[in-house]
Image (cartoon, rainbow, N blue to C red):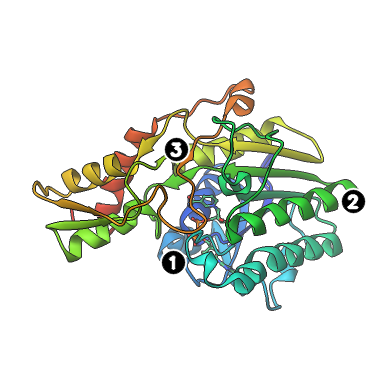
Amino acid sequence: MITGKKGNALKAVVTGGAGFIGSHLVDALVARGDEVTVIDNLSTGDLRNITTHLDSGAARLVRSDLLGDGWQDAIRDADRVYHLAADPDVRASAGNPASVYDQNVTATVRVLEAMRQAGCSEIVFTSTSTVYGEARVIPTPEEYPGMQPISIYGATKLACEAMISGYAHTYGWRSWVFRFANIIGERSNHGVIWDFVHKLRANPSELEILGDGRQQKSYCSVSACVDAVLFAVSRTNEPFSCFNIGTEDWIDVTSIASIVAAEMGLRDVSFRYTGGDRGWVGDVPRMLLSVEKLKSLGWRPALNSEAAVREATRALLRDTGVIP
Ligand code: NAD
């Protein structure tokens, strides 16, 4: 049973709350006493990520697809919606643009409409570094002027940001948009570390690396990411606030491969590169976000990219039963 409101506790709806980042956000909201409702169709999410909270009654699940109906009632008495549900696969987005548009843009507009009809006026949205495209300014600040996404995924997320800004200004809401670097850690279900662990389990002597291995990007732990989101939301009060979240350094793909192989106890792995300066259509060779805006509020990333990669690798190896 969800009990009554405690102190400053909010009634929070988390779309995509059974997913990788969403479930960590649910952990944090439950820990501070919010009443949490998760809306998730479990397409990539996993019930096990939130079972403890469902069993204890600290959270409830509305198992529903945002492109269908039946979930809108859950928003009726919510104070704030954290909208994370999306198709988050940048690489695959080149192969199914219309579906990614529906999952990301249409679903977001449906959430905004449900909020408008319910009178809910606060939304937190998880955007991405890919909205910047191949930025010429690195570290890239939120005010970067030439935003030109080069992936279908990035384009859909930028469209979502624009719709949220429009709704927030039109209807007097408060909104927060967070542009994430690569977020990694326990319960991750996609991305480079996940890919390397699974490839090395299948073949421990050779690892295929997409691109030339020199791509450099910022990797941030999921706990730091959730911490940054809640920190910024508690300290800003605008119709539309936008923050980058990442680390202040980057790490290249070959170094990630070396860390993953070492953490798996593999000494003689040969790396085979597919070549080119990027891994796939829509990928960028370099990504580092400026986090000065967040730092000016007093936030600091807990780990650098290398430490976050090592920690995330160990967590994934525990998740998959490779190490105890
Ligand atoms: P995830 O796939 O683990 O989580 C997405 C969740 O949304 C899943 O639980 C899935 O079942 C649910 N979902 C998807 N479509 C739905 C629909 N139509 N209706 C209801 N539920 C639906 O992915 P994640 O990595 O946790 O990503 C969470 C958010 O963060 C996404 O918006 C993603 O674009 C964004 N993001 C992630 C990263 C990253 O590095 N992981 C980086 C930038 C932005």
Give the amino acid at mark 3: Ser
Q: Residue at x 60, y 43 (%)?
A: 179
Q: Quadrant of residue 203?
A: bottom left
Q: Which residue is mark 2?
A: 171
Q: Residues within 10 Å of mark 1 (few under 14, many from 20)?
A: some
Q: Is residue 228 left or right of residue 120?
A: left
| SS state under label 2 | helix
In the picture shown, does residue 70 fall above or below 212? below
Cα distance in 3D space between marks 1 and 3: 26 Å
Q: Residue at x 47, y 32 (%)?
A: 247
Quadrant containing the N terminus in the rendered view: bottom right
Q: Quadrant of residue 143?
A: top right
Q: Is residue 101 left or right of residue 151?
A: right
Q: Which residue is mark 1?
A: 46
Q: Which residue is mark 3?
A: 218
| SS state under label 3 | loop
Cα distance in 3D space between marks 1 and 2: 34 Å
